[in-house]
Image (cartoon, rainbow, N blue to C red):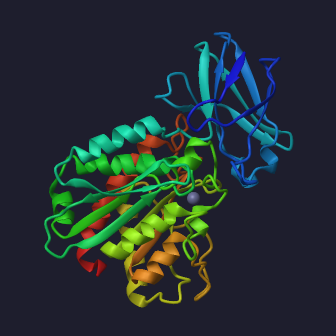
Amino acid sequence: MQIRSDFDSGNIEVLNAGDPARVRLAIRKDFASDHFQWFHFLAEGLSVGERHGFTLENAAQSSYRNAWPGYQTVASYDGVDWFRVPTHFDEHGLHFELLAEQASARFAYFEPYLRARHAQLLVQALALPNVELLACGSSLQGRELPLLHVRGTASAPRKLWLIAQQHPGEHMAEWFMEGLIERLAQPDAELQQLLSQADLYLVPHMNPDGSFLGNLRTNAAGQDLNRAWQVPSAERSPEVLFVQQQMAGQGVDCFLDIHGDEEIPHVFTAGCEGNPGFTPRLDELEQEFRQRLVAAGEFQVAHGYPRDQPGQANLALACNWVGQTYDCLSFTLEMPFKDHDDSPQPRTGWNGARSKRLAGAVLSVLASMVQKLR
Ligand code: ZN
């Protein structure tokens, strides 16, 4: 058997692939950082009809150890249809297996969103009559960082910002953006309502270097971008600096930062309740957004992060920094690596398609609330 990871978002180290029933592997650390959790590799030379076993032997030392209990690895024969395979975790690692139906298969932490698809998504978006490339930043390694502007019809529109995949291993975030852009291509009454009062500003992928390098958490300098919003720098976080400069030029009336969570098997949001500038108005907006999203899509409010104490928010996070700076509704939206246990789908778990549908629901919620946002 041959194990390869020399491609976009590939990450694996082969310890010993001599026994196909127990292939010994390890996850590589993020480039320039000690974080690790994301993996993605191709196994070739599988024996069709036979069971193959794989172990990620350093899983227990990964960034989020609690990510593994209850987690099922994703696999695909064609890179299009991804399904979960039997997986269990113990102190010796993350073990998973595949009864091979074909001679090669991919395995990953989550259905990957690749750079080639990102390029197609941009073409698709820019073909829409009301979408323009407003500006294009550059990552540390020189990958492009496009900012799309979706023009509505209002003379003084609300400015709604959505950014995705600051954490490069959270591939569900760009699937979400693809769902959003696909819905923009099919304007219905709700969408027209939204665009009659708002413009959208979209950064489909904040951390292209990290994703390409197969990182979980950081960019090419080893920087966690979602801890860089208070003091971004050209040397360590030009991706954040670019978006902040563009925000300063355009203004912000609503902000959604799209992420994936390793541990919690639910879709949820984290808000700005710990910001010094949090007000009853923002509290009401947060509650209304959450309630409407429960009704509109795969979302819930019972599970999530502990709430920040008043005034104790970490303003280095995008959600808090933007909410504080622009006095606006501002959320981190988290989708699971596991499944949304409120409506489990064992074959796929949470996946790209469900991330895309959630984006459609979020647009509906924003359409219903757009008047109140400022
Ligand atoms: Zn994240």
Up/down of 162 relative to 18, above or below: below
Residue 315, horizontal then vertical, whole percent: 57, 78
- Estimate the x, y position of residue 350 in percent, counting from the top left: 51, 45
Above or below, 83 relative to 233: above
Residue appearing at x 38%, y 87% in the figure: 281
Q: Give the camera-side residue of 342 and 240.
A: 240
**Residue depicted at x 47% and y 51%:** 173
Q: How many marks?
A: 0
Quadrant where ligand 1 appears: bottom right
Q: In the rendered image of this protein, does residue 52 appear above or below residue 212?
A: above
Q: Quadrant of residue 225?
A: bottom right
Indicate the quadrant where residue 156 lies. bottom left
Specify the quadrant of the image occupied by residue 162.
Answer: bottom left
Q: Is residue 78 visible?
A: yes
Quarter holding the C terminus is bottom left
Drawn side of residue 81 relative to residue 230, left or right: left
Pick the front one: 299 or 270: 270
Residue 105: x and y in percent read 60, 22
- Say if 319 sits above or below 358 in the image: below
Residue at (78%, 44%) from the top-left corner? 59
